[in-house]
Image (cartoon, rainbow, N blue to C red):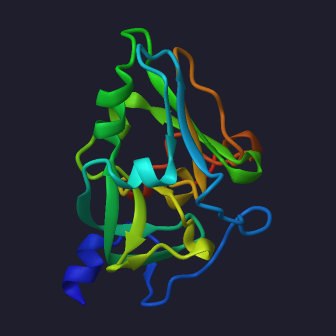
Amino acid sequence: MGEEKQRTPPNQRVTSKFPVLHVGPISKFDPKTWDFVVEGLVENPVKLTYEKFLKLPKTVSVSDFHCVTGWSKLDNRWEGVAFKTISDLAKPLKEAKYVTVVAEGDYTTSLPLEDLLNNDVLLAYRLDAKPLEPEHGGPLRLIVPKKYVYKSAKWVRKLRFTKEQELGYWEKRGYSNTADPWKEERYT
């Protein structure tokens, strides 16, 4: 219990379950029509089919998951593509400081590019050695372990590199834009 307490931000409780929370219906996935787009302030815009996305270099990252509603799930083994790999492919222009993450159903969030370049940030398509289930964000979910999970958007389809930060779905509704669970940055 001591180690769990040290790994759990203030006012969070550890769960072995994986609660399902999201805005709107669970996205339907068709690998034949699905695509992933990178646009905005980049030298090399990207558009990949699901098959081509899966051919990008794979990474594995074990991290903890902290929800703004107060639960934490420890030791999640995510597999996918490091955000840095996508950034290197797209080659952001020097004025690109933020990335807006666009998901199915027009859900968005955004983060500073600097935060997304951390080694533990990835676009995941597997969890604990199984394909990522749709209710947990499959086929593709952003994982940003150092932020509350509303920054880890489900059903990601597009990354837009920008000069100014664009507030996302929850941030426009009063949730913290910085979302640091260790500082309890839940709401503005």
Q: Nearer the viewer, residue 15 or 44?
A: 44
The part of the image, by quadrant, that contains residue 64 is: bottom left
Is 114 placed above or below 162 here?
below
Residue at 32% in and 65% down? 79
Q: Nearer the viewer, residue 153 or 125?
A: 125
Q: Nearer the viewer, residue 49 or 85?
A: 49
From the top left corner, tell me how far across and down residue 100 is, in percent.
Answer: 57, 33
Check the image and name the residue furthest to the left: 3
From the top left corner, tell me how far across and down residue 154 is, in percent.
Answer: 58, 59
Quadrant of the frame with the N terminus: bottom left
Quadrant of the frame with the C terminus: top right
> Would you say 176 lies left or right of 72 here?
right
Check the image and name the residue furthest to the front: 32
> Would you say 170 lies left or right of 39 here?
right
Is 95 placed above or below 103 here?
above
From the top left corner, tell me how far across and down residue 152 is, in percent.
Answer: 50, 55
Residue at 38% in and 55% down? 54
Residue at 52% in and 14% down? 163
Residue 109 visible in the snapshot: yes
Residue 183 visible in the snapshot: no
The part of the image, by quadrant, that contains residue 68 is: bottom right
